[in-house]
Image (tube, grey):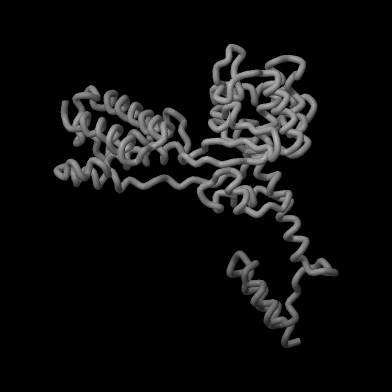
Amino acid sequence: MTLLAPTLEAFFTQRLAGQRQASPRTIASYRDTWRLLLSYALDTTGTPPAALDIAALDAGLISGFLAHLEQHRQNTARTRNARLAAIRSFFKFGALRHPEHASIIQQVLAIPAKKHGQRVVSYLTAAETTALLAAPDTATWHGRRDHALLALAAQTGLRVTELTGLTRGDAQTGTGPHVRCHGKGRKDRVTPLTASVTAVIRGWLRQQPGTPGDPLFTTRTGHRLSPDAVQQLVAKHAVTAAQHCASLNDKHVTPHTLRHTAAMSLLHAGVDPVTIALWLGHESPRSTQPYIHADLKLKEQALARTTPPKTKPGRYRPPDKLLAFLESLGLCRTPAAQKRQHNDIIGGQRA
């Protein structure tokens, strides 16, 4: 084997798992990035991954790989930047071990991340949320499970991986009802539950007996639900809910939409962004800014507070002919038109 294979193995075992103690999700994301990159390098150079040298992974090949992600795999700029971050992390690690490749490594590290626009977050209104929660058939076991999961997700704003990772012991429905989750960045947080959601979860726990360490939401055979299964059940019930709430036809409802819905509900209730960030497990309160940008109601309230009272609608009229001439310069498209307007104003002044 050449230099790449042992260095890549050391990067995952020593750097990520040992020194940084990266979460399993981070390791899996980095692993998938390198699977894709090594497959691309094999198709491009014809060299098997085990025989590939660090020198072969130059800036040209990495740039081609990033373009391949966007053009052929239809990845977004966000995904492209996440893959680039994983590659950069390895090359920073390799720079200390292989200074002989410093030039190639610096060229790769100089590849910039791609800028991308900020999309307006999608969330459900109160009527849409009610329709979605009413969609599962609670006369069946699956319907009661789905109803409990949707109600918990819409009220707490948990991520889909946090929902699927919950155990029965994480849901406390006694005094001070709350749910405890192990979130992103290995951070634990506690989220209080409303009386209605508490009643739903209490009923689900009563119907589905088990030990505190068992998953809260399971398949019929008792296995933990996967994130893909949650994605599918949310999409299925959204289609059903759209039959009674037409506005859902224009929205792509996902588990993350329910997270946005919880955040917007808190925002409408007057909760400050710092508290919302803590509620959702965000790293910084700045992460809540997209919710503020998406909330038209808050903007309309701000407009109502700043609009002067008893303002008569009208258009600005210059009080002086010279000012009128200056004002007209921005409206005249041709020099000839400007000259005619100038002559009209000057002639009017002489008269």
Q: Residue at x 52, y 40 (%)?
A: 188
Is the residue 212 above or below the residue 7 in the image? Answer: above
Q: Name, please, the residue furthest toward the left.
A: 100
Residue in the foreground of this view, choosing between 227 and 168: 168
Residue depicted at x 71% and y 25%: 147
Residue 274 place in picture, x, y as percent: 60, 53
Report the side of 18 relative to 250 (left or right).
Answer: left
In the image, residue 110 lies at what x, y percent? 30, 48
Q: Is residue 83 left or right of residue 174?
A: left
The residue at the far top in this view is: 221
Residue positioned most to the bottom: 350
- Please state which of residues 207 and 289 is positioned toward the viewer in this rendering: 207
State the image quarter where residue 105 is shown.
top left
Q: Looking at the figure, which quarter contains the N terminus?
A: top left
Disc tally is: 0
Q: Is residue 231 visible?
A: no
Residue at point 53%, 31% (across, down): 161
- Give the quadrant of residue 213: top right
Q: Position of residue 36 (x, y in %)?
A: 35, 27
Residue 161 appears in the rendering: yes
Q: Name the quarter where the C terminus is drawn.
A: bottom right
Residue 18 relative to residue 47: left or right: right
Where residue 207 appears, as percent x and y from the top left, is 70, 18
